[in-house]
Amino acid sequence: MTSSYVILLVLTFAAHKLLVGFVLGAAAWATVRALRGGDDPVAYASRDWLPFALGAAITAGVAPLLLIQVLYQHRVYTATLLLSHRFMAIVPALIAGFYLLYLAKTERVAAWPRLRRAAVTGTALAAFLFVAWTWIEEHTLAAASPEVWVAHYRDQALVHRDVTIAQRLVVWLGLAAAAFATGAGWLARGVSERDRRGLARVGLAGLVVAAAGAALLASGDPDDVPAVGMPYLVVAAVGLVAAAAGFVMWHAGVARARALATTGVVVLYVAVSALREARRVHRIEWRPTLEGAQGFPLFLAFVVIAVVVIVWCARLVSRNVR
Ligand code: HEM
């Protein structure tokens, strides 16, 4: 039973990370485009899809949020309570970011001068970076020792400082660039050769940054990757190489290279999420009462209900749009 929760956590978390990765990359591309002036199909598709992608990313965060509470209850609750308002600040940040993404799609904003247009998506981007930082901070504090929690509480600190937070963010930003490059490659229509090459370069650079960040993170960590995590490390390496090869071939204009890059990125995301979980399970204790926990059939029943309702809504919308 426990392992099924872990598998669900890995898969749902990988989906969440892929979507937030796209959101961040799309907001960055739209901001840079606005700063340079003019428009391009990638920036247009980014602005067009961003509100939906953010909604999907946030929704995809709910499942892993529930699962980490089931699996690591006392640690997640402790870290959240200790970070207090600092953690809850992600809510207004997300609301502001959401609104700005809708604003960026309006004709009114399209007529604004460069700097003001860039400020709209740029401020949303800053809000999402703040949310990413906060989640990593929460994750790091939850995995810390009780002594760290005591010191945090005693000092009435609102911010948890740890050198690995920035390193994790670097890994995640690199992965985000790769997720965006593949996502935008599928969504944008009429992309020029120049922009296609630009996307491939963004994806490749993202992989290099992610690999460098991971090496930095691993070098400062006294714990080796646990034996159970080794297969995921190997799969992650395979995904990385496949994605890199895909981006290089895509840059050169090879047909189907985009599909290879996308497959590599998805494999990489799932493997990294599995490796991350293998390390956590290895390092910290389970919630002791987990084996007595109930409700999995009920959870599955609600999954089915949710899927049916979503399909129904989608059909309703598509019928009425037509
Ligand atoms: C734009 C908005 C968001 C961004 C950029 C973002 C980014 C991130 C990042 C970078 C991590 C990785 C933490 C790590 O590996 O150390 C993460 C983890 C996570 N996020 Fe998000 N997130 C966003 C919104 C949300 C929302 C709204 C939810 C909940 C509904 C959520 C739920 C989670 C969960 C459950 C984790 C895993 C924490 C853990 O395993 O300890 N995220 N997020």
Image (cartoon, rainbow, N blue to C red):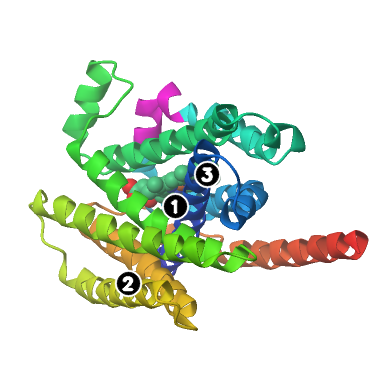
In magenta stretch: residue 106: no
Kindly state the secondary structure of the residue where label 2 is placed: helix
Describe residue 95's horizontal placement relative to residue 156 as left or right: right
In magenta stretch: residue 80: yes
Residue depth check, mark 1 versus mark 2: number of the one nearer the observer: 2
Q: Position of residue 285 (x, y in %)?
A: 25, 52
Distance Cα–Cα, label 1 vs label 2: 36 Å
Quadrant of the image containing the N terminus: bottom left
Name which residue type carries label 1.
Answer: Val
Residue nearest the viewer, comparing 42 with 322? 42
Describe residue 157's horizontal placement relative to residue 18 as left or right: left
Question: In which image quadrant can residue 105 be found?
Answer: top right
Circle 2 packing at 10 Å, graded few (<14), some (14-19), many (20+), is: many
Kindly state the secondary structure of the residue where label 3 is placed: helix
Q: Position of residue 29 (x, y in %)?
A: 49, 48
Give the residues drawn in magenta, as a range: 78-87
Question: In which image quadrant can residue 249 be found?
Answer: bottom left
N-terminal-most mark, 2 or 3? 3
Label 3, on which residue?
Answer: 33
Kindly state the secondary structure of the residue where label 1 is placed: helix
Q: Main secondary structure of the magenta part?
A: helix
Residue at 52% of width from left, 50% of height from top?
Answer: 26
Distance Cα–Cα, label 2 vs label 3: 25 Å
Label 2, on which residue?
Answer: 244
Residue depth check, mark 2 versus mark 3: number of the one nearer the observer: 3
Q: Is mark 1 within 8 Å of ligand 1?
A: no
Residue depth check, mark 1 versus mark 3: number of the one nearer the observer: 3
**Mark number displayed over residue 70:** 1
Q: Position of residue 63 (x, y in %)?
A: 53, 55
